[in-house]
Image (cartoon, rainbow, N blue to C red):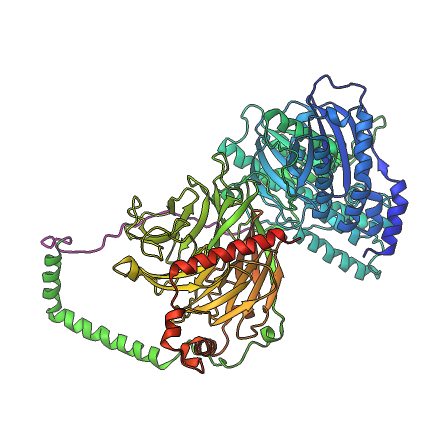
Amino acid sequence: MLPANIKIMWRLFHRRRTLDITLLTRKAHYSRLVLGIETSCDDTGVAVLDETGAILGESLYSQKEVHLRTGGIIPTVAQQLHRESIEVVVNEALVRSGVAPSQLSAVATTVKPGLALSLGIGLEFSKKFVREHNKPFIPIHHMEAHALTIRMLQSVPFPFLVLLVSGGHSILAVARGVDDFLLLGYTLDEAPGDALDKVARRLSLTKHPNCSTLSGGQAIELLARSGDRRKFPFRTPMGRIYDCCFSFAGLRSQITNSIMKKEAEEGIEQGMLLSCVNDIAAATQHTVAVHLAKRTHRAILFCKDNGLLSSEDPILVLSGGVASNQYIRNTLTVLTEKTGLRLLCPPPRFCTDNGVMIAWNGVERLREGKGILSPNEDVCYEPKAPLGVDISAKFTSCDITSAELNQILSSIGDRSKKMENSPKKQNNRKDQPGQACPEGSDQQVNTDQTELISCGMNHVEGGWPKDVDPQNVEHISRFRKRKERDESYINSAIQLCSITENSIKQNEAIEISEKIFEDVENVTESHQPPFTKIMTVFRDPMQLQRAVRALSWSTSESMKVAAAFSSNKFPLSSEMCKDSYVWDVEKSHSPLMVLKPSSPLLSLEYNPNDSTCLVGGCYNGRIVYWDTRESSRPVEAISTSTDGQVLWWDIRKMNEPTDRLLLDLGGDRSCPVGAISLGLNNIMNTKIVVGTQQGLVISCDKNGKTPAEKIIGIYKTNKGPVYAVQKNPFFPRNFLTAGDGSVSVWSDSIKKSPIMTFRNGIQYLTGACWSPFRPSVFFTLSLDGILDIWDILFKQTSPTLSVKVCDSVLCSVSIPNAGPLMTCGSTNGEVMLLKVWPGLLTPRNNESSLVTALIENGEKQQSPGSQIEEPSEEDEEDEEEDPRELIAEAERDFYRMTEEERSAP
């Protein structure tokens, strides 16, 4: 529920909204017209443009007055205002332009990045609009639209350097095409506009008589004109980090501390105006400008060294809401004059969020035929989305410094303020003091210069005499035996052995890894309720409706997760994207590696003993592998498919499998069962379990000599397909199955029924896996997007923790062997990275013995000896069923359940 005062303000300002409407008398002479809709933050902007860039009609609804009274942008308030105004604003823009919806060629809408609630309103309205009028839809990246606005106003060829500074973002990139950007730097924490607004709010500038109707950034700029920045020498952020990324959280912390100190000196409370508010505003604005200039200067040097800009006319484009600040513009003007670039800035009305820039981006994409979707194609908004290809990591390997940088920055403050305050015409002569020499720094530090020398060393093993061939084993053996009989060698060995023996005795006497408080439980974890939270979401970069078929974690120290993507619609089209991806958890903004198989991947798995090897199974039946290093060591893989075959492979010879097994339970090779899941244990890797479409689990042993000997057990598990089967990593004789609405734990020795069965609700399960840390914990996935975590030592009637991960179907899960993380994949192409409560990962005292007792108890209950009456020989003969009858019974159950679901209302 929203506060009552906000509801009242909605009603008041709904009638007093500010509409900025522009209508040009020039009408379109071209047939292609684009409607642009912008709702990424707090402004509802709509515009209609033709393909020449002429603005036929524009309408802008500003929420500025509402947010000034609420002390900042409240996402739910912005969402409601967007919902109330978007239809009115769109209709006004169309009426002003004189264009009917049927005359439009396409509709362009911001879908990323921005406030999630605001983006959702614009996307929802646009989907309804394009489907109603059957128009193509063009999803727009908000920062891309800012970067390309300058091309609507004047001819700017690619490539050019662009600096985007706004309330939510700060980006340095090289624009090489309409949808081709190289990302040089970005904001690590707070954006500059957000930092200025928070400083203004902390200074209570809305109570200043000249700033009551201004936004935070506008109030800072106004007061800074009459302030002295030298009274508050704030440090420039990231002074020792030599890349092009931005950070403003530390600067805001400095400013907050200075404000608190001044409030204490003047004896006033928070919320009252300071006497030095102008000086703080000037120092804040100057430090933000210098930080932007330093990072931009480093980007300019990098682009010149790598030939990323035009050598004839290099251009720097400054855009975004903060680019309206004249002091920042003047600062970058000084920088571009010193570095030989030409600075271009859109007019202030096009720097802030508006529908014109969205429509123009749609025009450029429409010209080149990029990113145009059909009206019925699904599109999702993305609150966080990178722009282009990230190459910011290359700055860590480059030494980009300049001796002229300090000289340039020393003149920025005075020149920027002089350019800002200089009138267009000066009629009256005035005497003003001046300083010819550049000002010195308030603080100086001189460090000793360290000279670094690169050198190498060639080390060759050996030191053999000339008459000894180090490649000949016999020569080396004779030489060693002769040296070992030498008295000097024997004396040296005896002397060294005494020293070594003393060290060994000390090592055995002191147990440095002894756990003193082993019996004491972690009090914090024991009283803390279980939890699981989503850390980040890895999305399919292709923005297609592809499901995450498989997930696998790397066993290396760097946390990497591989995901196999494939469409839900069969048969697959040959033109569909076949790429799958590998992500680094610490760099989640873009994939670390793109896997390009010949056919879409349905399964993907890391080698548990070598994290550089990936094996995948394709839709067309092929087995592919990726290896980042060359090695002669064999790597074995096991695969299975719905054709009823289990194949063993050696990646050194991939033209044919080393061994194969046909899952034909009848023995006549006429009716093999289709396999859809596979489970094995790294300790007993010759024995595997295979889940089938008919609800059977088949236990196989590679060491069997004949096909009949290789099939060592058949288990009737589910009434439907077995979507997951996995052996317990601590107890290889037990395995887990999931398929219908239940999950079961089985023992190799008991084939008629499971030793334990667990059920939670009526939803079908789509996946399950054991915890690699605790033998009593396992995870299950369901059709309604819920992740269940079970601890069978804690309780067996319901999950220990249930988490709603997403609204779509969860279809894959993977857990690394280190760290409190796990990943879940959904059918809409999202990979959720979750953090798990440490209590579910830390083994309890004597947990292995407790699980062993629990398993033995279940085996006793299901074993024939636990029955009161001994079965007769006739009963045993009746119980022995033909495997064909088991398959037929499973098929009948499957078709019966399918008919019941179809006939259900």
Residue found 13% across the figure and 68% down from its top: 484
State whether residue 852 appears in this view: yes
Q: Is residue 425 visible?
A: no
**Residue placed most toward the observer, 500 or 687:** 687
Seen at 80% across and 47% down, the residue is 80
- The answer to whether residue 455 is magenta is yes
Q: Position of residue 510 (x, y in %)?
A: 38, 80
Tell whether 319 sits left or right of 536.
right
Question: Which region is colored magenta?
Answer: 446-471
14 up-or-down from 699: above or below: above
Q: Is residue 795 magenta?
A: no
Q: Is 1 rendered above or below residue 656?
A: below
Nearer-the-camera pick, 644 or 408: 644
* Residue 403 figure quarter: top right
Q: Name the residue furthest front.
A: 874
Residue at horizontal 50 percent and vertical 81 percent from the top: 517
Q: In the picture, which quadrant includes the N terminus?
A: bottom right
Using the image as rendered, state which of residue 143 and residue 603 is in the foreground.
603
Spot occupied by residue 729 in the image (x, y as percentages of width and height): 42, 66
Residue at the image point whose x is 26% and y is 76% from the top? 499
> What is the x, y in percent for residue 703?
28, 61
Q: In the shown orientation, is residue 466 left or right of residue 254? A: left
Number of numbered labels in the structure image? 0
**Is residue 156 placed above or below 415 in the rendered structure?**
above
